[in-house]
Image (tube, grey):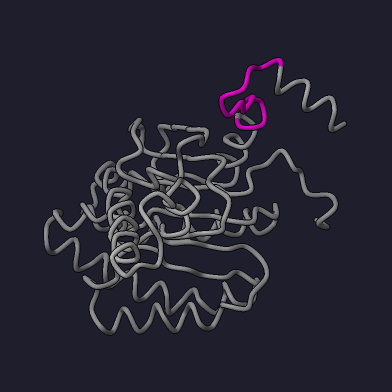
Amino acid sequence: MEPDTVDRRLPRHLAIIMDGNGRWAKKRGLPRYAGHPAGVEAVRGVVEACVEMRIPILTLFAFSSENWRRPQKEVNLIMDLFMRSLKKEIRRLDRNQVRLRVIGDRDAFSARLQKQIEEAERLTQNNVGLLLQVAANYGGRWDITQAAKRLAERVQAGELTAGQIDEGVMSKHLSFPGLPEPDLFIRTGGEKRISNFLLWQCAYTELYFTDQLWPDFNRQALEAAFLDFTRRQRRFGRTGEQVQGKTAEAS
C-alpha cells in the first residue's frame, strides 16, 4: 500500500493491553506460563498487520509495574521470554523497517536485559516504518510521577518557573514526548479497565474491549476493532455539529 492510499480513518497510534495469556493456557489444561509464548505469536501477527496497513505507531503493554506481584517463577519466566524474544525478533523487525522503543522504568531489569534493550533500540533507531513501543515495567502513575519529579528538579535549578508549567510542558516530560497520543486503545481478555496504562496520554482515546484472549487475537480481530473505530465520531469537547461542519469544510 502506497502512502497516498493509506486509509486516514485508521488510527495513527494504536495502544493495546494484551490480556488473557494465562487464561488461554489454563483453558487448554496448560500451566499459565504456556500462554506467554503463544502471546508472542499474536504480537508478531499484529505487528505485521500494522506494518501492512501503515499504522505509524503501535504501543503494547507487555509488563506493568504491578506485574512484579505475580508469582516469582512466572515473573522469571516472563523476563527470560522477553530476552529471547528480543534476540529472535529484532532482525525481523529491522528488515521490515520497524523502529523499536521500550518505555518504562528499566532500573528493575537485569543489567543483561537492559543492555539487550539498548542494543535492539540502537539497531533499529534509523528505521522509518512502524514505531513499535513496548511498555515494560511501565505504569501510568509512574509516568506522571517521574515527569513531575523532573519538572520539580528544573524549577529548583532555575530552568523554569512553576507558572510556566502547563499541559504542553508536562507532556514533554512523559515517556514519549512529541508523538501523537493514542487514537485507539484495545484491551483483550474481557476486562473493561485501562489498568494504569497511559493514563495521561489516553485522555481522549477511543476505548475498545473484546472478550478474545490475547493469543487468539489475529488480523481479523484487529480489523474488526478498526472498523468499529472508523464508525465513531471523535469530538474532543466539541459538539457533533461542530465536528460535522469541520469535516465538511475539509472536504
Tell me the residue at 35%/84% (across/down): 115
- Is 48 on the left-hand or right-hand side of 69? right
- Is 64 on the left-hand or right-hand side of 101? left
231 and 190: which is toward the camera: 231
14 and 73: which is toward the camera: 14
From this viewpoint, which residue is outermost toward the right? 251
Check if residue 203 falls in the magenta segment.
no
Range covered by the magenta-colored residues: 229-241
- Is 249 on the left-hand or right-hand side of 103? right
By secondary structure, the bulk of the magenta-drawn segment is best described as: loop
Q: Quadrant of the N terminus?
A: bottom right
User: Residue 105's x, y, as percent?
Assistant: 29, 66
User: Residue 172's x, y, as percent?
Assistant: 47, 58
248 and 94: which is toward the camera: 248
Tell me the residue at 17%/58% (across/down): 68
Q: Quadrant of the C terminus?
A: top right
Tell me the residue at 33%/33% (across/down): 191
- Tell me: residue 231, above or below residue 186: above
- Tell me: residue 165, above or below residue 89: above
Among the 4 quarters of the image, the one containing residue 72: bottom left
Tell me the residue at 45%/77% (across/down): 88
User: Residue 202's x, y, as percent?
Assistant: 45, 40
